[in-house]
Image: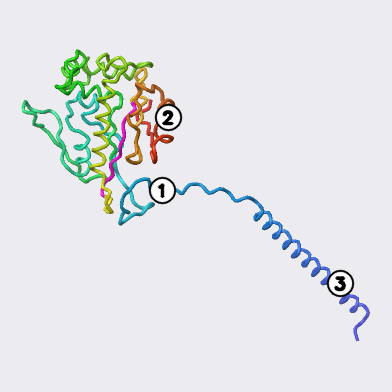
Amino acid sequence: MLSDSTSLLLNGGDNRMRASSAKANAFAIAATVAVCASLALVQSAPAEPQGPPPWQRTESRADCTDYEPLRTPLFGETHVHTTYSFDAVSGDVRSGPRDAYDFAKGSAIDLPPYDAGGVAQRSTQLRRPIDFVAVTDHAETIGEVQICQNPVHPNYNDPICVNFRDAIPQESQVAGVGVVIFGVLTAVPSPARFDFCGVDGSVCSQEASLVWQDMQDAAEEHYDRSDACGFTSFVGYEWTGNPATQNIHRNVIFRNEDVPSLPTSYMEEPTPEGLHAALTSGCLDAVDDCDVLIIPHNSN
Protein backbone atom coordinates (compact mmCIF):
# COMPACT_ATOMS: atom_id res chain seq x y z
CA MET A 1 0.00 0.00 0.00
CA LEU A 2 1.37 3.40 -0.97
CA SER A 3 1.92 6.05 1.62
CA ASP A 4 -0.01 9.28 1.52
CA SER A 5 3.12 11.19 0.56
CA THR A 6 3.83 8.82 -2.32
CA SER A 7 0.24 9.07 -3.49
CA LEU A 8 0.44 12.87 -3.44
CA LEU A 9 3.67 12.79 -5.48
CA LEU A 10 2.12 10.54 -8.10
CA ASN A 11 -1.06 12.55 -8.27
CA GLY A 12 1.01 15.71 -8.61
CA GLY A 13 3.04 14.09 -11.36
CA ASP A 14 -0.14 13.04 -13.15
CA ASN A 15 -1.44 16.60 -12.94
CA ARG A 16 1.81 18.01 -14.37
CA MET A 17 1.79 15.41 -17.17
CA ARG A 18 -1.82 16.28 -18.02
CA ALA A 19 -0.94 19.99 -18.04
CA SER A 20 2.07 19.38 -20.25
CA SER A 21 0.02 17.24 -22.63
CA ALA A 22 -2.71 19.89 -22.81
CA LYS A 23 -0.09 22.54 -23.56
CA ALA A 24 1.41 20.42 -26.35
CA ASN A 25 -2.03 19.82 -27.83
CA ALA A 26 -2.83 23.52 -27.71
CA PHE A 27 0.47 24.37 -29.47
CA ALA A 28 -0.21 21.77 -32.17
CA ILE A 29 -3.70 23.16 -32.73
CA ALA A 30 -2.37 26.72 -32.88
CA ALA A 31 0.33 25.70 -35.35
CA THR A 32 -2.24 23.94 -37.53
CA VAL A 33 -4.48 27.00 -37.52
CA ALA A 34 -1.53 29.23 -38.43
CA VAL A 35 -0.52 26.99 -41.35
CA CYS A 36 -4.11 26.86 -42.60
CA ALA A 37 -4.38 30.63 -42.33
CA SER A 38 -1.13 31.07 -44.24
CA LEU A 39 -2.28 28.72 -46.97
CA ALA A 40 -5.55 30.63 -47.18
CA LEU A 41 -3.65 33.89 -47.58
CA VAL A 42 -1.40 32.40 -50.26
CA GLN A 43 -4.36 30.96 -52.13
CA SER A 44 -6.31 34.19 -51.93
CA ALA A 45 -3.37 36.43 -52.98
CA PRO A 46 -3.24 37.27 -56.69
CA ALA A 47 -0.64 35.34 -58.68
CA GLU A 48 2.54 37.24 -59.49
CA PRO A 49 2.81 37.94 -63.22
CA GLN A 50 5.47 35.84 -64.87
CA GLY A 51 8.34 37.70 -66.52
CA PRO A 52 9.75 36.93 -69.95
CA PRO A 53 11.83 33.78 -70.30
CA PRO A 54 15.57 34.25 -69.74
CA TRP A 55 16.29 33.59 -73.41
CA GLN A 56 14.13 33.59 -76.49
CA ARG A 57 15.17 33.05 -80.08
CA THR A 58 14.41 35.98 -82.36
CA GLU A 59 15.55 34.56 -85.67
CA SER A 60 15.18 31.55 -87.94
CA ARG A 61 18.06 29.12 -87.60
CA ALA A 62 18.86 25.52 -86.73
CA ASP A 63 19.50 24.41 -83.16
CA CYS A 64 23.20 24.06 -82.36
CA THR A 65 24.23 20.41 -82.03
CA ASP A 66 26.41 21.08 -78.97
CA TYR A 67 24.45 23.91 -77.38
CA GLU A 68 25.38 24.49 -73.74
CA PRO A 69 24.28 27.88 -72.39
CA LEU A 70 26.49 27.96 -69.31
CA ARG A 71 29.66 26.09 -70.18
CA THR A 72 30.79 27.23 -73.61
CA PRO A 73 33.44 29.97 -73.57
CA LEU A 74 33.31 31.99 -76.78
CA PHE A 75 35.93 34.42 -78.05
CA GLY A 76 35.34 37.27 -80.45
CA GLU A 77 35.79 40.93 -81.34
CA THR A 78 33.29 43.77 -80.94
CA HIS A 79 35.26 46.68 -82.41
CA VAL A 80 36.42 46.26 -86.02
CA HIS A 81 36.97 48.95 -88.67
CA THR A 82 37.24 48.40 -92.40
CA THR A 83 37.64 50.50 -95.53
CA TYR A 84 34.26 52.05 -94.68
CA SER A 85 35.83 54.00 -91.77
CA PHE A 86 37.72 57.24 -92.43
CA ASP A 87 40.47 56.51 -89.92
CA ALA A 88 41.12 53.04 -91.32
CA VAL A 89 41.22 54.46 -94.85
CA SER A 90 43.70 57.11 -93.70
CA GLY A 91 46.08 54.25 -92.87
CA ASP A 92 45.49 52.82 -96.37
CA VAL A 93 43.39 49.90 -95.10
CA ARG A 94 41.68 48.35 -98.12
CA SER A 95 39.88 45.44 -96.47
CA GLY A 96 36.10 45.41 -96.33
CA PRO A 97 33.68 43.69 -93.95
CA ARG A 98 33.90 40.38 -95.79
CA ASP A 99 37.66 40.40 -95.46
CA ALA A 100 37.29 41.08 -91.75
CA TYR A 101 34.95 38.11 -91.31
CA ASP A 102 37.25 35.84 -93.35
CA PHE A 103 40.16 36.91 -91.16
CA ALA A 104 38.18 36.11 -88.01
CA LYS A 105 37.42 32.66 -89.42
CA GLY A 106 41.09 31.90 -90.04
CA SER A 107 42.04 33.36 -93.42
CA ALA A 108 45.03 35.65 -93.96
CA ILE A 109 44.37 39.35 -94.46
CA ASP A 110 46.40 41.91 -96.39
CA LEU A 111 48.02 44.83 -94.61
CA PRO A 112 49.49 48.07 -95.95
CA PRO A 113 51.72 49.21 -97.49
CA TYR A 114 50.72 48.35 -101.05
CA ASP A 115 53.01 48.56 -104.06
CA ALA A 116 52.25 50.52 -107.23
CA GLY A 117 50.25 47.58 -108.53
CA GLY A 118 48.05 47.41 -105.46
CA VAL A 119 49.69 44.31 -104.02
CA ALA A 120 49.99 44.22 -100.23
CA GLN A 121 53.49 43.99 -98.87
CA ARG A 122 52.38 42.35 -95.64
CA SER A 123 49.70 40.00 -94.33
CA THR A 124 48.71 38.46 -91.04
CA GLN A 125 46.64 35.55 -89.80
CA LEU A 126 45.15 34.45 -86.48
CA ARG A 127 46.66 31.41 -84.80
CA ARG A 128 43.13 30.11 -84.27
CA PRO A 129 39.76 31.33 -85.57
CA ILE A 130 37.46 33.21 -83.24
CA ASP A 131 33.76 32.62 -82.68
CA PHE A 132 32.07 35.96 -83.39
CA VAL A 133 32.74 39.42 -84.78
CA ALA A 134 30.86 42.71 -84.95
CA VAL A 135 32.11 45.02 -87.71
CA THR A 136 31.57 48.50 -86.24
CA ASP A 137 32.58 51.10 -88.80
CA HIS A 138 32.15 54.78 -87.92
CA ALA A 139 28.53 55.63 -88.71
CA GLU A 140 29.17 59.37 -89.10
CA THR A 141 31.00 59.32 -92.44
CA ILE A 142 30.36 55.99 -94.12
CA GLY A 143 28.61 57.81 -96.96
CA GLU A 144 31.22 60.56 -97.26
CA VAL A 145 34.15 58.11 -97.30
CA GLN A 146 32.53 56.13 -100.09
CA ILE A 147 31.87 59.25 -102.16
CA CYS A 148 35.49 60.33 -101.80
CA GLN A 149 36.74 56.89 -102.93
CA ASN A 150 34.34 56.34 -105.83
CA PRO A 151 35.76 57.87 -109.04
CA VAL A 152 32.39 57.77 -110.80
CA HIS A 153 30.55 59.72 -108.11
CA PRO A 154 29.79 63.33 -109.12
CA ASN A 155 31.37 64.67 -105.91
CA TYR A 156 34.56 62.60 -106.13
CA ASN A 157 36.63 65.67 -107.00
CA ASP A 158 35.23 67.92 -104.32
CA PRO A 159 38.17 69.70 -102.61
CA ILE A 160 37.42 67.94 -99.33
CA CYS A 161 37.65 64.55 -101.04
CA VAL A 162 40.84 65.53 -102.88
CA ASN A 163 42.49 66.62 -99.62
CA PHE A 164 41.32 63.41 -97.95
CA ARG A 165 42.86 61.20 -100.64
CA ASP A 166 46.06 63.25 -100.66
CA ALA A 167 46.51 62.48 -96.95
CA ILE A 168 46.51 58.71 -97.64
CA PRO A 169 48.49 56.86 -96.51
CA GLN A 170 49.07 58.47 -93.15
CA GLU A 171 52.72 57.69 -92.57
CA SER A 172 53.19 59.28 -89.14
CA GLN A 173 51.32 59.79 -85.89
CA VAL A 174 50.32 63.24 -87.13
CA ALA A 175 47.28 62.98 -89.39
CA GLY A 176 47.10 65.05 -92.55
CA VAL A 177 44.70 67.97 -92.88
CA GLY A 178 42.43 65.96 -95.16
CA VAL A 179 41.92 63.34 -92.45
CA VAL A 180 41.66 65.84 -89.60
CA ILE A 181 38.73 67.52 -91.37
CA PHE A 182 36.79 64.26 -91.13
CA GLY A 183 37.65 63.87 -87.46
CA VAL A 184 36.55 67.40 -86.63
CA LEU A 185 32.98 66.50 -87.61
CA THR A 186 32.60 64.53 -84.38
CA ALA A 187 34.50 66.94 -82.15
CA VAL A 188 32.05 69.86 -82.20
CA PRO A 189 28.82 70.04 -80.17
CA SER A 190 26.62 70.84 -83.19
CA PRO A 191 28.01 68.86 -86.12
CA ALA A 192 27.10 69.64 -89.74
CA ARG A 193 27.78 67.59 -92.83
CA PHE A 194 30.08 68.67 -95.64
CA ASP A 195 28.64 70.94 -98.31
CA PHE A 196 28.95 68.20 -100.94
CA CYS A 197 26.34 66.20 -98.98
CA GLY A 198 23.67 68.69 -100.08
CA VAL A 199 21.57 71.14 -98.11
CA ASP A 200 19.71 68.40 -96.25
CA GLY A 201 22.59 65.89 -96.25
CA SER A 202 20.62 63.54 -98.50
CA VAL A 203 23.50 62.94 -100.95
CA CYS A 204 25.64 61.41 -98.20
CA SER A 205 22.69 59.72 -96.51
CA GLN A 206 21.81 57.97 -99.76
CA GLU A 207 25.37 56.71 -100.11
CA ALA A 208 25.37 55.69 -96.45
CA SER A 209 22.26 53.58 -96.99
CA LEU A 210 24.09 51.59 -99.68
CA VAL A 211 27.04 51.02 -97.37
CA TRP A 212 24.76 50.06 -94.49
CA GLN A 213 23.00 47.51 -96.67
CA ASP A 214 26.33 46.05 -97.76
CA MET A 215 27.40 45.77 -94.12
CA GLN A 216 24.21 43.83 -93.39
CA ASP A 217 24.68 41.61 -96.46
CA ALA A 218 28.26 40.82 -95.47
CA ALA A 219 27.17 39.86 -91.95
CA GLU A 220 24.43 37.59 -93.30
CA GLU A 221 26.78 35.91 -95.78
CA HIS A 222 29.18 34.94 -93.02
CA TYR A 223 26.66 34.00 -90.33
CA ASP A 224 26.56 30.23 -89.87
CA ARG A 225 22.88 29.42 -89.43
CA SER A 226 23.47 25.67 -89.65
CA ASP A 227 23.44 23.37 -86.62
CA ALA A 228 27.25 23.55 -86.58
CA CYS A 229 26.99 27.15 -85.28
CA GLY A 230 30.57 27.69 -86.37
CA PHE A 231 30.59 31.51 -86.57
CA THR A 232 28.40 34.44 -85.62
CA SER A 233 28.57 37.80 -87.39
CA PHE A 234 26.78 40.78 -85.85
CA VAL A 235 25.44 43.82 -87.66
CA GLY A 236 26.75 46.92 -85.93
CA TYR A 237 28.39 50.32 -86.13
CA GLU A 238 30.28 52.84 -84.01
CA TRP A 239 28.68 56.03 -82.74
CA THR A 240 31.69 58.31 -82.61
CA GLY A 241 30.92 61.12 -80.21
CA ASN A 242 34.13 63.08 -79.74
CA PRO A 243 33.15 66.44 -78.21
CA ALA A 244 36.26 68.42 -77.28
CA THR A 245 38.25 65.29 -78.25
CA GLN A 246 36.82 63.34 -75.28
CA ASN A 247 36.26 60.10 -77.23
CA ILE A 248 32.78 59.29 -75.90
CA HIS A 249 32.41 56.41 -78.34
CA ARG A 250 29.83 53.63 -78.37
CA ASN A 251 29.80 50.31 -80.22
CA VAL A 252 26.20 49.62 -81.26
CA ILE A 253 25.58 45.92 -81.89
CA PHE A 254 22.28 44.41 -83.01
CA ARG A 255 21.00 41.04 -81.90
CA ASN A 256 19.84 39.85 -85.31
CA GLU A 257 19.14 40.99 -88.87
CA ASP A 258 16.21 43.21 -87.81
CA VAL A 259 17.89 46.62 -87.74
CA PRO A 260 16.94 50.27 -88.42
CA SER A 261 17.08 51.58 -91.98
CA LEU A 262 20.15 53.70 -91.17
CA PRO A 263 22.60 53.95 -88.29
CA THR A 264 22.08 56.74 -85.78
CA SER A 265 25.33 58.69 -85.81
CA TYR A 266 26.76 61.61 -83.88
CA MET A 267 25.57 63.83 -86.73
CA GLU A 268 21.93 63.09 -85.88
CA GLU A 269 22.24 62.59 -82.13
CA PRO A 270 25.31 64.27 -80.57
CA THR A 271 24.70 62.96 -77.03
CA PRO A 272 24.64 59.43 -75.59
CA GLU A 273 21.14 60.11 -74.26
CA GLY A 274 20.02 61.05 -77.76
CA LEU A 275 21.52 57.85 -79.14
CA HIS A 276 19.64 55.78 -76.55
CA ALA A 277 16.37 57.55 -77.35
CA ALA A 278 16.85 57.09 -81.09
CA LEU A 279 17.54 53.37 -80.70
CA THR A 280 14.50 53.00 -78.48
CA SER A 281 12.20 54.66 -80.99
CA GLY A 282 13.92 53.38 -84.12
CA CYS A 283 14.71 49.82 -83.03
CA LEU A 284 13.13 48.56 -79.80
CA ASP A 285 9.73 50.20 -80.39
CA ALA A 286 9.66 50.22 -84.18
CA VAL A 287 11.18 47.09 -85.72
CA ASP A 288 9.89 43.59 -84.99
CA ASP A 289 12.46 41.60 -82.99
CA CYS A 290 14.98 44.44 -83.11
CA ASP A 291 17.21 44.41 -80.05
CA VAL A 292 20.47 46.23 -79.47
CA LEU A 293 23.48 46.34 -77.15
CA ILE A 294 25.49 49.55 -76.63
CA ILE A 295 29.06 49.12 -75.40
CA PRO A 296 31.13 52.17 -74.37
CA HIS A 297 34.71 51.95 -75.50
CA ASN A 298 37.65 54.22 -74.57
CA SER A 299 35.29 56.59 -72.74
CA ASN A 300 37.49 59.07 -70.95
* Helix, strand or loop status at disc 1: loop
Q: Which residue is mark 1?
A: 56
Viewer-proximal residue, 74 or 257?
257
Q: Residue furthest bottom?
A: 1
Viewer-proximal residue, 244 or 198?
198
Q: Amino acid at mark 1?
A: Gln
Q: Position of residue 269 (x, y in %)?
A: 39, 23
Residue pictured at 30% horizontal, 39% vertical: 234
- The alpha-carbon separation of the residues under discs 3 and 2 comes to 78 Å
Q: Residue furthest left?
A: 117
- Magenta stretch bounds: 230-239
Of circles 1 and 3, the one toward us is 1
Q: Which residue is mark 2?
A: 276
- The alpha-carbon separation of the residues under discs 1 and 2 comes to 23 Å
Q: Amino acid at mark 2?
A: His
**Quadrant of the image for the C terminus?**
top left
User: On the image, which quarter does residue 42 sit in?
Assistant: bottom right
Q: Which residue is mark 3?
A: 15
User: On the image, which quarter does residue 263 sit in?
Assistant: top left
Is residue 285 part of the magenta span, yes or no? no
Q: Is residue 19 above or below residue 212?
A: below
Q: Position of residue 151 (x, y in %)?
A: 14, 21
Q: Position of residue 155 (x, y in %)?
A: 19, 17
Residue pictured at 6% horizontal, 28% vertical: 117
Q: Which numbered disc, 1 or 3, marks the residue that appears first in the sequence?
A: 3
User: On the image, which quarter does residue 24 sit in?
Assistant: bottom right
Residue pictured at 16% horizontal, 22% vertical: 169
Residue pictured at 22% horizontal, 45% vertical: 129
Of circles 3 and 2, the one toward us is 2
Q: Position of residue 288 (x, y in %)?
A: 39, 39
